[in-house]
Image (spheres, rainbow, N blue to C red):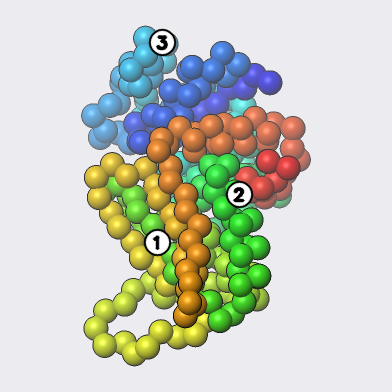
Amino acid sequence: MSAKISIPGGNGRMGKTLIKEIIENENLELANSYCLPNEKEKGLDLGTLVGHNPIDKILTDNLTSIFEDTDVIIDFTVPEASILHVEKAATYKIPIVIGTTGFSNEQFDKIKSFSNKIPIVYSANFSVGITIMKKLINDATKNLGSDWEIEIFEAHHNKKVDSPSGTALLLGSVAAKARGKNLDDIKQLSREGIIGKRKKDEIGFSVVRGGNVVGEHSIKYFNGDERLEINHIANDRSIFAKGAIRSAIWTLNQKPGFFTLDHVLK
């Protein structure tokens, strides 16, 4: 099914990856893309922006442009911008796919509040591999029992602004839920100084930022005799773009509601 897709933040890492994927797909059309007024890429042809031939569409600083002559929006920006985009998308009755991470609970509730007006697909990670990893974590956590300790490791590039990653928190939520717990009640985001021994039910998080790492996530289970690890490594961020585009096309046949990648892949 063909679709016209708009991309806010087209000069960002994921924005450029999405634009490239859309241009290279003959069944898709890049509708519009915008950036902030002070960005150096403003005014560039969107094809040139991603290393392709010009397509006679420029990266504008006009936010309203992404809601014009478009079927669906894909948003990988920042929480404050995503809230603005989903609010306007609801006004224009345009479905939206959101891959932004770092939302507070209040911001996330705000996003979900518009799902009675338009289809919204949200995922902290749009890779198929992470979707499978979630299922493995659910099964492993339930089968291993509460005497196994859980730690989560993640690594990303040096420009990622939120920590831990949305994906790491997502994986932690899956593990916590499998034990009948709320992650907010048992997560341990930092350890420094003399803090005492590890609490029985806590789920610890370790974070690395450096270089151009696309994304690495690992959940580790420990008991006194052995260790189990489930790992996922993203080698190219195009995997996230492909999942988001698949979700965007899927929304075109949906009624208003709040969905995840799990719904799309069923």
Residue 108, given in percent of the width and then of the height, sits at 54, 58
Residue 136, relative to residue 4: is it above or below? below
Q: Are marks 2 and 1 in contact (CB under 8 Å)?
A: no
| SS type, badge 1 | strand
Residue 62, relative to residue 134: is it above or below? above
The type of residue carrying mark 2 is Ile
Kindly identify the residue that appears in the image at 39 percent across and 57 percent down. 154
The residue nearer to you, when weighing 74 against 263, is 263
Kindly identify the residue that appears in the image at 24 percent across and 83 percent down. 193
The type of residue carrying mark 3 is Asp
First reached walking from the N terminus: tag 3 or tag 2 = 3
Q: Which quadrant does the C terminus fall into? A: top right
Kindly identify the residue that appears in the image at 36 percent across and 65 percent down. 206
Q: CA distance from mark 3 to mark 2?
A: 40 Å
Q: Which residue is mark 1?
A: 153
The disc at residue 139 is none
The residue nearer to you, when weighing 53 against 203, is 203
Kindly identify the residue that appears in the image at 31 percent across and 77 percent down. 191
The residue nearer to you, when weighing 248 against 83, is 248
Q: Which quadrant does the N terminus fall into? A: top right
Residue 97, given in percent of the width and then of the height, sits at 57, 40
First reached walking from the N terminus: tag 2 or tag 1 = 2
Q: Which residue is mark 3?
A: 56
| SS type, badge 3 | loop
Q: Which residue is mark 2?
A: 132
Residue 128 shows in this picture: yes
The residue nearer to you, when weighing 67 against 77, is 77
**Which image quarter: residue 20?**
top left
Q: CA distance from mark 3 to mark 1?
A: 43 Å
